[in-house]
Image (spheres, rainbow, N blue to C red):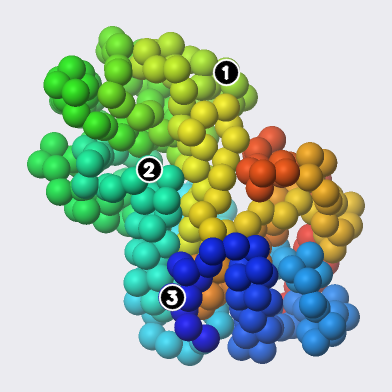
């Protein structure tokens, strides 16, 4: 397969063809995925629609080596997690695919990276090794080619001063940060930003009490003086990201799609606007598995956008972990 062809997808016909080709390739070459399909008694040759493709439970990345080739591993990414929990592990045998995915994905939604000063507030990710998010943001910082771009761990004084200074100068800024760190920032400093995109990347990571997205975005919007809070939807197990420019409504790049499954029957795909488990087709995952059943709850809309409504707890996961390979 041509691993870079996914970035030339123009329409649903292109996507569906490549997705089905990818499914057949991974069903043949990915031992774990092949055994999973076999356990479900699915005939690979009978799968003719992307809605018929079985999605691998994301928890398998914690217990198995998910690979579709025998190439040398170039990078290993690990999920964040609390002490004593198994971490998801994503083995990457072609970093160029990941770099192309996040670079082209950013351009698709935000334009030329060189127009932005990237300020990153990701303390919990920087404090550990193997973060795919840190790898992505570090690469974007380099591509921005702005001397002020960079990571900030605990030096909030410097970050606040720089952010206010650059914003007043009219610089185009992207502040990307984990939720608890962004809240720490606005609780200690004053902002009224006009040229800055605020992008949150997820929850409190055990540092603060979780709050619903609407409340988080309202507090952040008031604290930074901006009308909308952007969001990034990504995870260790995926090599592509979806983005929201406000209101928690996400859109995907052309090589990524969201499907919603029935929480009682993991093989049943729901229509738009019906809530269920989020399945992700990420064609950038060609060397691992492109069809992932996440532990997130959400719903899709007619324009292919989607919303994240929450997460399963362990007791809610039915029909997803039907087997142990």
Mark 3 residue element: loop
Mark 1 residue element: helix
In the picture, measured across the screen, residue 23 lies left or right of residue 157, that is right
Name the residue carrying label 3.
Answer: 4
Residue placed at 79% from the left, 77% from the top? 48
Name the residue carrying label 1.
Answer: 215
Q: Nearer the viewer, residue 182 or 269?
A: 269
Distance from disc 3 to disc 2, alpha carbons, whole Å, reads 21 Å
Name the residue carrying label 2.
Answer: 110
Nearest-to-viewer mark from 3 and 1: 3
For the C terminus, give its image quadrant: bottom right
Q: Is residue 242 above or below residue 158?
A: below
Please report whichever mark, 3 or 2, sits nearer to the chain's N-terminal start.
Answer: 3
In the picture, measured across the screen, residue 24 lies left or right of residue 88, that is right
Where is residue 142 shown, x and y percent of the image?
19, 53
Q: Nearer the viewer, residue 307 or 108?
A: 108
Where is residue 86 shown, x and y percent of the image?
56, 58
Distance from disc 1 to disc 2, alpha carbons, whole Å, reads 25 Å
Crowding near pointer 1: few (<14 within 10 Å), some, many (20+)? few
Q: Is residue 82 above or below residue 205?
A: below
């Amino acid at each position: 397969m041509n691993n870079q062809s996914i970035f030339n997808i123009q329409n649903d016909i292109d996507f569906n063809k490549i997705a089905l080709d990818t499914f057949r390739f991974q069903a043949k070459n990915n031992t774990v995925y092949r055994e999973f399909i076999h356990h479900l008694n699915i005939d690979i040759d009978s799968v003719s629609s992307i809605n018929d493709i079985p999605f691998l439970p994301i928890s398998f990345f914690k217990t198995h080596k998910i690979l579709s080739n025998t190439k040398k591993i170039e990078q290993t990414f690990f999920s964040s997690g609390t002490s004593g929990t198994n971490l998801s592990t994503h083995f990457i045998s072609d970093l160029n695919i990941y770099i192309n995915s996040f670079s082209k994905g950013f351009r698709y939604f935000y334009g030329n990276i060189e127009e932005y000063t990237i300020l990153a507030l990701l303390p919990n990710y920087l404090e550990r090794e193997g973060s795919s998010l840190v790898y992505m943001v570090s690469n974007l910082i380099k591509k921005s080619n702005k001397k002020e771009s960079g990571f900030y761990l605990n030096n909030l004084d410097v970050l606040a001063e720089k952010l206010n200074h650059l914003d007043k100068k009219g610089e185009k800024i992207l502040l990307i940060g984990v939720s608890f760190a962004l809240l720490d920032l606005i609780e200690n400093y004053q902002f009224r930003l006009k040229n800055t995109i605020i992008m949150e990347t997820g929850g409190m990571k055990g540092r603060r009490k979780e709050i619903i997205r609407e409340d988080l975005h309202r507090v952040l919007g008031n604290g930074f003086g901006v009308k909308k809070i952007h969001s990034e939807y990504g995870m260790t197990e995926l090599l592509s990201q979806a983005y929201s420019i406000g209101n928690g409504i996400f859109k995907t790049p052309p090589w990524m799609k969201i499907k919603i499954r029935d929480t009682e029957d993991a093989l049943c795909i729901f229509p738009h606007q019906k809530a269920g488990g989020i399945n992700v087709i990420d064609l950038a995952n060609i060397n691992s598995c492109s069809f992932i059943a996440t532990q997130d709850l959400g719903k899709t809309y007619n324009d292919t956008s989607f919303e994240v409504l929450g997460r399963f707890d362990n007791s809610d996961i039915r029909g997803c972990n039907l087997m142990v390979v």
